[in-house]
């Protein structure tokens, strides 16, 4: 376990009577890739704004890198690269000029900035259009430029707000790849999205926000299990020819709670991942094990439930 | 702040807006010169002092002087340079990005304001130099030291005045989300002060202290004093008084009361010395600076605590 780089305590934001973020307690460790899920209007952007000091919390406290963003906004902004929802650039300036301006605002020396920007534009696949004005760019290109833009300052943390919204599927893959590379470099990432599959693909841990409240927070696989099987594992084993006796054989394996058979497929509920023991039991019983897998409980069920409510 | 300043300055100078504004001001300068050439011979007698200053102040029969053009265009230029300072950043989605960089919020406003002021300064100084240069060739009388100081002071006051309109436009750009709204609001304020206020002030003064053909001097003075003080809530009036005092030293006063009196008594034979002129306009200049500071302060207060959300 590393240090918490983002920590909020009872963080609340109220807009004239309407509670957008409600007593949020988040703790994100260094190097983590945190998926911040929630339907539109759940309060994700508002939370990010408070983490950056771009809006003041109504109550509660925030620490980013140990600093209070309201009191020490500059220090926090030095650490964090923020990719806003629907990021915008100076349309008449070229991609390179836009990044250069960011470098200047971060007081990066010219020679260093030149080099860094050229290599970043290569990384995000914009080398060829580096000197074209941004108003000729597609949404996806702008979004990739946005990722290069937060990289210019070499941040310790990156807050990405809906980075894939409004982009075609190929573009989405490019962006997810860039984010995943960023994560591999050890940057702590908060990835806000209302799209579960993308978050699931990248993040080890998610928080689900609904109506400003954190309704789930944890590792993806654990959250899935919690949602579907009250903390239990579900496995499926396929055998060549199912004998009714095999059900009893598996039941006798320690930790197995329940077995049901449908055709050649056995549905097994257990306290933990018992694939090893179960496969031995099946083979010992004389049957042939054709395949076995742990049922992936997608978060979809809980996520759907909460998004509907919201 | 320096980075913001540099970018904004480069933006301004390469922008279409700047070129249009400059052409506008340049053409008006040409026009003013033309008028001055047409009429200056008839104004200037053998004993006339400050011939050089006449270049700026001489108007034709029905044609306005350079001063008039300038007092018309400075607010327009100021507004044009400031009305979209903040809200265009917001609507283009740049503000969130900008505000997440390690810079102070006020440095964004400061950088933009100083860049605008620089452009304004270049423009005014440029036009005045053009008029002075061309005028010099035509009139053939070089300015003396006092005239140079007066012209420079005039340039400085003009920049301050333009700065006020820019600060007002920046203020509206902070308050209104749409650039069209902030532009119209700024123009509305200008039109009010420039065109309507004199009418309103005249009406109020006449209602409070009516005058007619039989009125005594006291009554006329009262009317004029009232009108003068009321008109001074307008930065246009303040600027007008200041530049008249600077460029026409023989007028001798910005005070309408004294003007009225002197036109009765035939005073004001001698032009006012430079120091006196400067002292005379000092309150006006300070007031314009104060108005500018009020606009600026209000922009700060609003902008510093405002939520920066991409829309
Ligand atoms: N300035 C504001 N004034 C009032 N309500 C707001 C304001 N900004 C956001 N909200 C409300 O707060 C809620 C959360 O918004 P937001 O954080 O943008 O959600 P998300 O990013 O998860 O889609 C929304 O219901 C929105 O309508
Ligand atoms: Mg959002």
Image (tube, coloured by chain):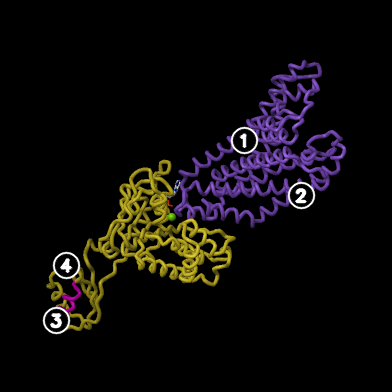
Q: Which residue is mark 1?
A: B288
- Asked if residue A115 lies left or right of residue A68, the reply is right
* Label 3: chain letter: A
Q: Which chain is mark 4 on? A: A
Magenta stretch contains residue A276 = yes
Task: Assess disc 2: are there few (<14), some (14-19) or many (≥20) residues with their C-alpha within 10 Å of its C-alpha.
Answer: few
Whether residues under marks 4 and 1 lie with C-beta atoms below 8 angstroms apart, the answer is no
Do badges 4 and 3 share one subunit?
yes
Q: Which dot marks residue A285?
A: 3
> Is B37 included in the stretch rendered in magenta?
no
The residue shown at (56%, 54%) is: B6
The label number, if any, that marks residue A162 in the structure image: none
Badge 2 is on which residue? B27
Residue B296 seen in the figure: yes
Chain to which the residue tagged by mark 2 belongs: B
Front-most of A52 and A73? A73
Chain coloured yellow here: A
Q: Which residues are magenta?
A: A274-282
Of the two numbered discs 4 and 3 on the same chain, state the one appearing first in sequence: 4
User: Mark 1 and mark 3: span between their CA atoms?
Assistant: 97 Å
Q: Is residue A244 above or below residue A44?
A: below
Q: CA distance from mark 4 to mark 2?
A: 91 Å
> From mark 2 to mark 1, how far is it between C-alphas?
27 Å
Regarding ligand 2, which quadrant of the image does it lie in? Answer: bottom left
- In terms of secondary structure, where does tag 2 sit? helix
Task: Give the drawing colour for chain B.
Answer: purple
Q: Indicate the position of residue B271 as horizontal and vertical percent values.
A: 76, 30
């Amino acid at each position: 376990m590393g240090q918490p780089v983002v920590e909020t305590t009872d963080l609340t934001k109220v807009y004239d009577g309407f509670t957008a973020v409600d007593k949020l307690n988040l703790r994100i460790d260094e190097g983590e890739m945190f998926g911040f899920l929630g339907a539109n209007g759940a309060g994700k952007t508002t939370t990010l704004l408070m983490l950056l000091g771009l809006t003041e919390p109504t109550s509660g406290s925030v620490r980013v890198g140990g600093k209070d963003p309201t009191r020490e906004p500059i220090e926090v902004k030095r650490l964090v690269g923020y990719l806003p929802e629907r990021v915008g650039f100076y349309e008449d300036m070229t991609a390179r000029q836009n990044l250069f301006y960011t470098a200047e605002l971060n007081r990066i020396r010219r020679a260093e900035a030149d080099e860094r920007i050229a290599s970043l534009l290569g990384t995000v696949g914009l080398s060829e259009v580096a000197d074209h004005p941004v108003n000729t760019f597609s949404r996806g290109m702008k979004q990739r430029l946005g990722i290069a833009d937060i990289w210019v300052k070499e941040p310790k943390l990156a807050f990405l707000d809906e980075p894939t919204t409004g982009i075609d599927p190929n573009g989405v893959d490019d962006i997810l790849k860039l984010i995943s590379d960023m994560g591999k470099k050890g940057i702590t990432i908060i990835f806000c999205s209302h799209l579960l599959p993308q978050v699931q693909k990248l993040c080890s841990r998610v928080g689900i926000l609904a109506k400003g409240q954190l309704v789930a927070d944890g590792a993806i696989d654990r959250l899935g299990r919690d949602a579907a099987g009250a903390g239990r594992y579900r496995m499926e084993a396929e055998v060549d020819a199912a004998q009714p006796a095999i059900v009893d054989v598996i039941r006798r394996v320690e930790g197995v709670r329940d077995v049901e058979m449908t055709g050649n497929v056995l549905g097994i509920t257990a306290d933990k991942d018992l694939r090893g023991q179960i496969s031995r039991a099946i083979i010992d019983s004389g049957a042939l094990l054709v395949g076995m897998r742990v049922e992936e409980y997608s978060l979809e069920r809980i996520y759907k439930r909460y998004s509907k409510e919201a | 702040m320096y980075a913001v300043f540099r970018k904004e300055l480069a933006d301004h100078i390469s922008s279409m807006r700047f070129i249009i504004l400059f052409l506008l001001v340049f053409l008006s300068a040409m026009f003013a010169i033309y008028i001055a050439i047409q009429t200056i011979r008839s104004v200037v007698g053998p004993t006339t002092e400050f011939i050089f200053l006449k270049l700026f102040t001489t108007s034709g029969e029905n044609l306005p002087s350079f001063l008039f053009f300038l007092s018309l265009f400075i607010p327009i230029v100021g507004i044009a340079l400031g009305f979209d300072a903040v809200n265009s950043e917001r609507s283009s989605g740049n503000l969130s990005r900008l505000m997440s960089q390690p810079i102070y919020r006020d440095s964004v406003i400061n950088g933009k304001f100083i860049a605008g002021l620089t452009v304004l300064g270049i423009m005014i100084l440029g036009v005045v130099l053009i008029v002075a240069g061309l005028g010099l060739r035509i009139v053939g009388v070089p300015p003396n030291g006092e005239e140079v100081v007066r012209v420079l002071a005039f340039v400085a006051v003009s920049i301050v005045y333009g700065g006020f309109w820019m600060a007002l436009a920046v203020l509206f750009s902070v308050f209104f989300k749409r650039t069209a709204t902030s532009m119209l609001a700024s123009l509305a304020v200008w039109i009010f002060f420039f065109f309507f206020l004199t009418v309103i002030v005249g009406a109020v003064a006449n209602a409070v202290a009516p005058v007619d053909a039989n009125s005594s001097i006291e009554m006329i003075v009262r009317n004029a004093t009232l009108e003068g003080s009321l008109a001074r809530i307008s930065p246009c009036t303040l600027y007008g008084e200041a530049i008249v005092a600077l460029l026409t030293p023989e007028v001798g006063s910005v005070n309408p009361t004294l003007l009225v009196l002197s036109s009765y008594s035939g005073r004001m034979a001698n032009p006012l010395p430079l120091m006196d002129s400067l002292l005379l306009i000092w309150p006006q200049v300070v007031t314009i600076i104060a108005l500018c500071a009020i606009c600026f302060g209000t922009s700060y207060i609003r902008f510093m605590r405002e939520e920066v959300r991409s829309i």
